[in-house]
Image (spheres, rainbow, N blue to C red):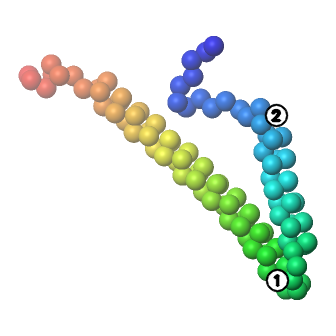
Amino acid sequence: MPRMGPDVQQPHSAAWIAQVWISFVLSFGTTLVGVYAMPGDIWIKGFMAMGLVFTVGSSISLSKTLRDQHESQRLSARIDDARVSKLISEHDPLAAGL
């Protein structure tokens, strides 16, 4: 098995992607059915459905923001590593003493 560094990402398998989509559709669908079947006036059901939609949207935005933040930190860490490597390669301890 090839050794993978911290910058190598394995793509998601088709089974994982299918599981994620099925889980999302089932959880959203069953919650909508629950809101529809809930006793109460239409405005209460509408409020609950609206809350569900905003919660899903906020969850998507949060996950995207966290992913973007993580990727930017990885990029800045690689840039810092490259700068340090360049400084080390350019440093000649014998030339400094002369």
**Residue 5, placed above or below residue 73:** above
Q: Quadrant of the C terminus?
A: top left
**Residue 67, placed above or below residue 49:** above
Q: Residue at x 59, y 29 (%)?
A: 8
Residue 42's image quarter?
bottom right
**Residue 35, placed above or below residue 17:** below
Is the Cβ of the residue at disc 1 closer than 8 Å to that at disc 2? no
Find residue 33 and report its horizontal and vertical position in percent.
Answer: 90, 66
N-terminal of the pair, mark 1 or mark 2, is 2
| Front position among marks 1 and 2 | 1
Q: Nearer the viewer, residue 57 or 28?
A: 28
**Image disc number at residue 60:** none
Find residue 13 and report its horizontal and vertical position in percent.
Answer: 77, 32
Q: Residue at x 85, y 54 (%)?
A: 25
Kindly identify the amino acid type of the residue bearing the numbered disc 2: Ala
**Residue 66, placed above or below residue 18:** below
- How far apart are the alpha carbons under marks 1 and 2? 39 Å
Find residue 3 and report its horizontal and vertical position in percent.
Answer: 57, 17
In the image, taking residue 21 as reference, residue 93 lies left or right, namely: left
Q: Residue at x 71, y 67 (%)?
A: 55
Kindly identify the amino acid type of the residue bearing the numbered disc 1: Ile
Which residue occupies the extreme front position in the image?
Answer: 39
Residue 50's image quarter?
bottom right
Residue at label 1?
A: 44
Q: Quadrant of the N terminus?
A: top right
What secondary structure is found at the residue carrying circle 2?
A: helix
Q: Nearer the viewer, residue 96 or 31?
A: 31
Residue at label 2?
A: 14
What secondary structure is found at the residue carrying circle 1?
A: helix
